[in-house]
Structure formats: C-alpha cells, structure tokens
Image (tube, rainbow, N blue to C red):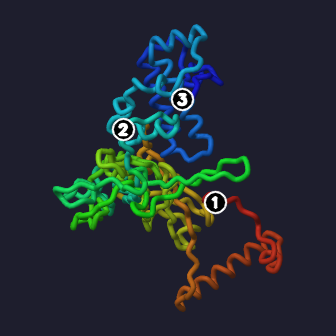
Amino acid sequence: MAATAQRDYYEVLGVARDADEQAIRDAFRKLALRYHPDRNKDPDATERFKEIAAAYAVLSDPAKRAAYDAGGMTGISAEDLFGRINFEDIFGGLGFDFGGGLFDTLFRRSHTGPRGGENIEVLLEVSLHRIAQGGLETVHYRRPARCEACGGSGALAGTSPRRCDRCGGTGRLVSSRREQQVAVQQITTCPDCLGRGTLIEDPCPECAGSGTVQTEESLRVRVPRGIEDGTALRVPGRGLPSPEPNGQDGDLFVIVRAAHDERFERRGPHLYHEQSVAVAEAALGTTLRVPTLGPSVRVKLRPGTQPGTVLRVAGKGLPIFEGSGHGDLYVHIAVRIPETLSREERELYERLRQVSTTHANADGASPSDAGDSPRPTRRHHLRR
C-alpha cells in the first residue's frame, strides 16, 4: 500500500494541523472503533478504516509527519507505515483484532517463518441483562488442537516423518512436455504423501497420524457494557492449529449477539416493548406498570390513547457502547379487544354503543354514516 493521500490526513482524523500526539491518538482510537470491519458491516467501512489507519501511522510518527507536512510521503510500504505501531497497546482490553491479523489482511504484509493457523468464529448469545451490566461469559466450542503426544508431527513419539522420495519433500509432482513450440508444465499433488511432503511410517496412536485431535474447550470472555450486536471479540491463539509444527495457532473470534427476550426487542441502545391494555384503559386512561432491565416503572396512559401509540421512557434502554448515557425504552400500546364477553360486559358494551350512537346523531351524522366514515385520528406507530 502506498501512502498516497486521497484526502488530507489531518482531515481524515478530524484534527488540527498543530494537534499533539495525544489528540491524534484519541481521534484515531475513536474512528477506528467506529469503522473496524468486525463491527461495521457497511460496504465502505474497510476502505475507510484503512484510510484512518494510514493517517494515524503517518501523523503519530514525528519523522513521517514532518515528511508528510513537507510533501514527501510517497512510495512508503505498509511495513514502513505500521511496523512500529503497537495497536494492542492502543486498544488493549477491548478484545478486538487491531493487531497483526487484521493489518496483515488489509495491507498484505509479508510474512516470515512458519504459516499460522486459520481463525475460527463462534456465536455467543448473551442476555440483555449481561449486555446492560457487562461481565464474564463462558464460551464452549470444539476445535482441532495440536496433538500433545506427537507435538503435531503425526509421528509416534521418538520418531519423525521422513521426506517423501517421490516428490522430494515438495508435496508436488511436476511434469513438462512440449507441444509444437510451446513448453507445457503440469503440477499435481503427490499421491504418495498427499501434498504433505513427508511420510509417516509409525503414526501417533493418539491422533492416527493427523497431528491434531478434536477437543472440547471452554473459556471465559469479558463482554463490554452495551456491546453492539455482531461485535467480534478476539481471543489470540485459540483458533485452528498451524499446519506447520512451529507455526502459531490462529485466533478465535467470539461473535456476540443479544439472546431472544420475550419482553424486549433491541435496536442499538434502545429497547422496544409491547404493552397490552384493555379498551376501557385506553379510553379512560390509567397508570401502567412497565418492565425494564431493572425495576419496573410506572407510566401514565392519557385518556383517549389510540392503538399504535408509542410512549418513550427516557434512559431505560441499554448503555451506549463506548459512550456515555443510556438508550431509551419505547412502549408500543396495543389495545386489547375481547374475543368473548360475559353477560354483564355485553350489556355494558350495548349501552356504550347506544350512547355513542346518540352522540353521533346529536352531531348531525346518521348511524350508518358514523359506521361507514369514521373520523380520522392521529396515531404514532411503532417503526418496524
């Protein structure tokens, strides 16, 4: 990645040109948390994140910043930009992948040494109460782990795999031929070693020569207060084992989602609750007892409340993730129409209909008109 600025790096981070190191660091942290690809699924989030990271890499380094201010930041590699930045120090404790794995992927750093294992993902559903309070949750999952008996080699303890004679340890067979004036080369997987480059004469009895064993694992992860749905918590080294004996294991990404709750629907930091009320309560008004994630609250229902009305209870939602304050609780009023009536209820409803008809006639409308052309009312609907 060349550090050619499509936009001014100070503008990218939203800081003044004389901003100090701490201001630049704080601006980058805020923006990076917002646009990190594990948290922001917008199509443009990855490119925006790369732009933010490049801006920070330049402006946080005095020498690079001076060169940039002088117009000399061209042809700089990703390794030059990010090699000395400790992203874990900047984002420590949050559990997000702001370290090597992410930047290796986005900026295609070159690697040396054995190949690392692949990352894996598991879904963790947590209650709204846990999201509101934060704290530790246990994750259970299965993964192939490096066989301890053979150290991942697949060979019986005290022995070693031997190099495949057929492919010379490359795992591939190469054949060449000429067709007219064109040289054709064909590369195939070695059938003897199946591409491993080695043969195991005495396989490990614990893993049957595979080098890995399936394990049931559990670990405790800390769920931040107000964590947003779909956020990935990164646990280094708990992914798939490296295909090479001395390689590092991949990482585990725990995808956090809110578990289903009969009382509430979550939308960001806000909670939505449907409250059923009788016809008489909607017409006459009443005081409702509404559940929250803490003690229930009393909400006044005005006389004449219409079906679909939404009442707002400020500050009774979830904590705002990485911010201050809480979201709100929205109460959707659903007027309950009885399906069956007792004799007394039927008499009362008949009397109510007579009174309503009398009032309608007094207003100059015929009973049929009153039924066919109801007077429109203003309603506040719950947004779906």
Is disc 2 placed on a helix, strand or loop? loop
N-terminal of the pair, mark 3 or mark 1, is 3
**For mark 3, what is the residue?**
52
**Label 2 belongs to which residue?**
113
**In screen coordinates, is 269 left or right of 148?**
right
Q: Is residue 288 left or right of residue 129?
A: right
Mark 3 residue type: Ile
Tell me residue 102's x, y (percent): 46, 40
Using the rendered view, name the quadrant where residue 6 is placed.
top right
Mark 1: secondary structure: loop
The residue most toward the bottom is: 343
Lateral position of residue 319 relative to residue 138, left or right: right
The amino acid type found where label 1 is placed reads His
Nearer to me, 104 or 369 = 104
Instruction: Residue at 55%, 88% (x, y): give it.
Output: 341
Q: Secondary structure at mark 3?
A: helix
Q: Camera-side residue: 26 or 368?
A: 26
Residue 200 seen by the camera: yes
Q: For mark 1, what is the residue?
A: 381
Locate the C terminus and report the quarter of the image it occupies: bottom right
